[in-house]
Amino acid sequence: MSAYVIADVREVRDQETLVEYRRRNTDAVAHHGGRFVVRGGEAELLEGAWDSLRIVVMEFPDVEAARAWWESEEYAPLKAMRREASDTNIILVAGA
């Protein structure tokens, strides 16, 4: 069953670092069988309050693959890079 990692970027402190993060994370996600479904496209609020700067959705073959990416040595320095450059909420959701 597919799994999705959803990132909700709330604040950006260093845009240049995030550009480098995105470039390097593309390969890290692919290495774990993932792909980007949404990568910061235009979003329209339909209901409620959602103050997001950018939404990213990654699809992985299953929860285990998503966790393998998240916990990988390959992603660890990128995770630190992203945390320094932005405030982001990230969730893992199992598909239906």
Image (cartoon, helix red, strand yellow):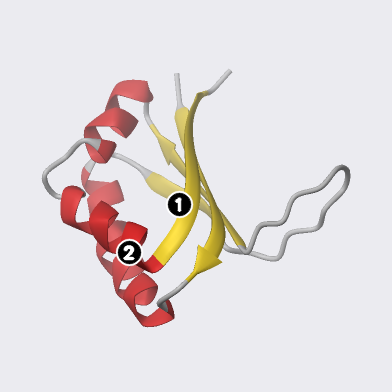
Q: Residue at x 25, y 56 (%)?
A: 80
Q: SS class of the residue under badge 2?
A: helix
- Amino acid type, callout 1: Phe
Q: Who's the residue at 28% across and 38% down the image?
A: 70
Question: What kind of residue is marked 2?
Answer: Glu
In the displayed structure, 68 sits above or below 11; it is above
Q: Which mark is residue 61?
A: none
How packed mark 1 is, by other alpha carbons closer than 10 Å (few <14, some 14-19, many 20 or more), is some
Can residue 11 be seen by looking at this rendering? yes
Reading the image, the residue beneath label 2 is 84
8, 63: nearer the viewer: 8
Q: Nearer the viewer, residue 84 or 74?
A: 84
* First reached walking from the N terminus: tag 2 or tag 1: 1
| Foreground label between 2 and 1 | 2
Please tell me which residue lies in front, 66 or 8.
8
Q: How many marks on residues?
A: 2
Could you classify mark 2 by the number of other residues whose Cα lies within 10 Å: few (under 14), some (14-19), or many (20 or more)? some
> Which residue is the extreme one toward the right?
47
Quick check: 27 left or right of 7?
Answer: left
Q: Is residue 72 above or below residue 76?
A: above
Which residue is labeled 1 in the image? 36
Q: Residue 38 location, x and y as percent? A: 56, 54
Q: Residue drawn 37% across and 23% down? A: 63
Q: Secondary structure at mark 1?
A: strand
Residue 27 in view: no
Residue located 70% across and 65% down the image: 42
Locate residue 47, reporting x and y percent.
88, 43
**What distance separates the C-alpha of mark 2 from that of mark 1?**
22 Å
